[in-house]
Image (tube, helix red, strand yellow):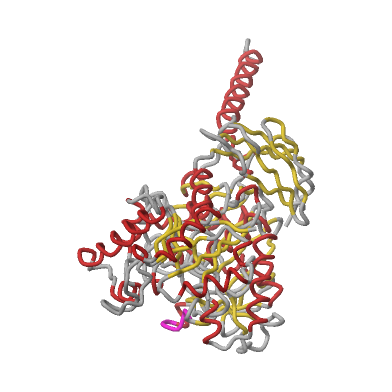
């Protein structure tokens, strides 16, 4: 033996131990997430900073209260001391942005799953070679999934289909799709599972048609959604010690085109149901509720308001009540408008709403039908004056600044949203992204505003308001039952949903928008330390009313180690609600876990 060798070996071991310790505490010190506690969004090495195809996923995760970070392919493939010891809780391969994958990455993903990891594989991710051509025969991860897809060699221009996606009622409920967002589906192909089949529907359109790959083979896992021809639209399969969630829909693309419900649904399902990770609730104190948005746009509303008052409707609330203030309603000179500046009766109602604590807002610009039917992306110079007029009269009559908005006929050009944000509005009703909780809506694949929140309406099939239900001859008892189901859904899922009508436990839009903007300022992180999950949170002003959910299948009752708050037990999860204060630390012992 070389003299002094044992001493040098000992010194080297001590150095390596020091480096490993420094690396561990550098990565997992307070204020940083431990990889095994978060989801990794796998992105190409050449992904551009600020790419909306990536930010659309990160924004969705933040809105759902899910800890997720972007990880480049080279980082994923480059082992380190930390990586070897601590894997990510799950990997997401997004659609559109990550079509290409080399053989090394594909092998690493398979090994990751079979060794106990979890993968969310979305639509066209990993279907192309690094040269940009589709892999021969089928997508290379077909074997891991258990069905073949991306069959360009054999199906050519028939490789994809466009049609409804559906599931049985119990699965729709399990996925967290709200009541009314589906319609009965009768085209159930032989061999497709699901009792009481329901297809995803949209406002005014009815059953929606989605693009998906034609799949071949019997899926050997849990089917979540089927295509109209009986193919696999979404499903989870255990593989080795781990599992893969395959979503055969272009989730990121759809969210960019104002249909964000599928992306949010499956990202939440992956995080909460498959991975059982703690999440930050998007409602004050984690208490779900409804926003009831009233649209008052003509002088006929006065008698309806008096009738509603007789029935005791105004003993509830608060509501979000929006007005079209001009003297005309359908066209110039018809005299059917509310004429708020000279309508003493409506001015009294306005003050009563204000005293009750209702949130007042603008319903478009001055002339309801004319504005809604004529406002376009390219006529701002002509139409902006109507927004200004309506806003001036509303603020003069109410004595307060307007912060909420709803679009007549649902017409919401991008410039209108930008005008609203620049004039201090924080919330607007929206007929895109139907069925979702409040969200910052992408349009044409991009986010054009930063601080204003859209409030998508919930739908009952293809209708949304009481008047529409009446025109469609939907029985009152069915509408009433739907409202009860929506109320239960919001309460059970600790979420916010919005419905609207013209007047013939509530929130207002601005209340929720203010809470969500305060929630955006919170900094919080996850780490597994020993046998406990640690949540560390801080806020520049106050954490009050922020809350975290810990799924019961994985966690014991949480303990608040630092800060103020309370722990509430629900059927499926523990809820920790923060009290006043700037910092908070929560710990929860983990239970044996495996999917």
Q: Name the quarter where the C terminus is drawn.
A: bottom right
> At x 60% / y 78%, what residue is drawn?
166
Residue at the extreme left of the image, as rendered:
381
Q: Position of residue 481 (x, y in %)?
A: 68, 76
Q: Position of residue 301 (x, y in %)?
A: 46, 73
Instruction: Tell me the magenta residue range.
Output: 156-162
- Classify residue 244 by image quadrant: bottom right
- Classify residue 396 by image quadrant: bottom left
Toward the viewer: 508 or 358? 358
Residue 126 visible (yes or no): no
Residue at the extreme front of the image, as rendered:
344
Residue 263 visible (yes or no): yes
Toward the viewer: 530 or 1? 530
Residue 210, compared with residue 80, is above or below; it is: below
Residue 46, compared with residue 434, is above or below; it is: above
> At x 66% / y 33%, what residue is drawn?
585
> At x 47% / y 72%, what residue is drawn?
302
- Classify residue 329 by image quadrant: bottom left
Toward the viewer: 595 or 218? 595
Q: Position of residue 143 (x, y in %)?
A: 60, 68
Q: Position of residue 174 (x, y in %)?
A: 69, 67
Question: Is 365 positioned to the left or the right of 308 in the image?
Answer: left
Total numbered badges shown on the rendered structure: 0
Q: Is residue 159 magenta?
A: yes
> At x 63% / y 87%, what residue is drawn?
188
Q: Is residue 296 magenta?
A: no
Q: Name the quarter where the N terminus is drawn.
A: top right
């Amino acid at each position: 033996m070389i003299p002094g060798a044992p001493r040098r070996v000992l010194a080297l071991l001590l150095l390596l131990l020091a480096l490993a310790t420094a690396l561990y505490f550098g990565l997992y010190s307070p204020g940083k997430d431990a990889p095994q506690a978060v989801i990794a969004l796998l992105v190409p090495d050449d992904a551009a900073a600020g790419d909306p195809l990536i930010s659309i996923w990160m924004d969705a995760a933040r809105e759902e209260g899910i800890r997720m970070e972007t990880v480049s392919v080279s980082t994923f493939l480059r082992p380190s001391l930390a990586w070897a010891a601590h894997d990510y809780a799950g990997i997401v391969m997004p659609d559109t942005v990550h079509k290409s994958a080399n053989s090394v990455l594909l092998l690493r993903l398979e090994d990751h799953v079979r060794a106990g990891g979890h993968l969310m594989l979305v639509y066209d991710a990993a279907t192309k070679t690094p040269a940009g051509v589709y892999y021969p025969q089928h997508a290379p991860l077909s074997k891991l999934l258990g069905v073949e897809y991306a069959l360009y060699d054999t199906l050519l221009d028939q490789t994809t289909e466009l049609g409804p996606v559906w599931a049985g009622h119990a699965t729709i409920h399990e996925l967290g799709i709200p009541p009314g967002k589906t319609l009965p589906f009768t085209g159930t192909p032989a061999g497709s599972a699901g009792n009481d089949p329901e297809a995803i529907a949209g406002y005014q359109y009815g059953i929606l048609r989605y693009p998906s790959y034609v799949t071949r083979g019997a899926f050997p896992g849990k089917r979540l959604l089927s295509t109209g021809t009986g193919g696999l639209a979404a499903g989870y399969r255990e593989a080795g010690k781990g599992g893969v969630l395959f979503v055969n829909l272009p989730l990121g693309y759809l969210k960019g085109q104002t249909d964000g419900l599928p992306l949010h649904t499956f990202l939440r399902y992956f995080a909460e149901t498959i991975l059982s990770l703690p999440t930050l609730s998007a409602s004050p104190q984690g208490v779900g509720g409804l926003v009831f948005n009233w649209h008052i746009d003509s002088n006929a509303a006065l008698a309806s308001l008096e009738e509603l008052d007789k029935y005791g409707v105004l003993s509830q609330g608060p509501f979000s009540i929006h007005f079209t203030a001009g003297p005309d309603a359908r066209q110039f000179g018809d005299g059917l408008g509310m004429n708020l500046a000279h309508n003493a009766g409506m001015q009294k109602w306005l003050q009563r709403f204000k005293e009750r604590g209702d949130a007042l807002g603008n319903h478009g610009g001055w002339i309801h039908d004319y504005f809604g039917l004529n406002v376009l992306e390219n006529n701002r110079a002509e139409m902006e004056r109507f927004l200004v007029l309506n806003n001036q009269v509303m603020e003069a009559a109410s004595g307060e600044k307007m912060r909420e908005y709803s679009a007549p006929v649902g017409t919401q050009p991008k410039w209108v949203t930008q005008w609203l944000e620049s004039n201090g509005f924080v919330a607007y009703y929206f007929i895109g992204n139907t069925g979702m909780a409040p969200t910052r809506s992408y349009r044409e694949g991009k986010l054009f505003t930063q601080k204003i929140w859209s409030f998508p309406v919930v739908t009952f099939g293809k209708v949304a308001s009481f008047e529409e239900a009446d025109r469609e001859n939907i029985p009152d008892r069915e509408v009433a039952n739907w409202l009860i189901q929506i109320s239960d859904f919001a309460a059970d899922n600790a979420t916010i949903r919005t419905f609207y009508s013209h007047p013939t436990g509530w929130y207002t839009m601005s209340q929720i928008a203010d809470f969500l903007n305060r929630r955006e300022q919170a900094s919080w992180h996850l780490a597994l330390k020993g046998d406990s999950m640690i949540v560390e949170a801080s806020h520049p002003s106050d954490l009050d009313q922020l809350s975290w959910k810990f799924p019961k299948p994985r966690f014991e009752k949480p303990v608040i180690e630092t800060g103020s708050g309370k722990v509430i037990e629900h059927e499926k999860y523990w809820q920790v609600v923060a009290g006043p204060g700037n910092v908070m630390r929560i710990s929860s012992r983990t239970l044996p876990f495996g999917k």
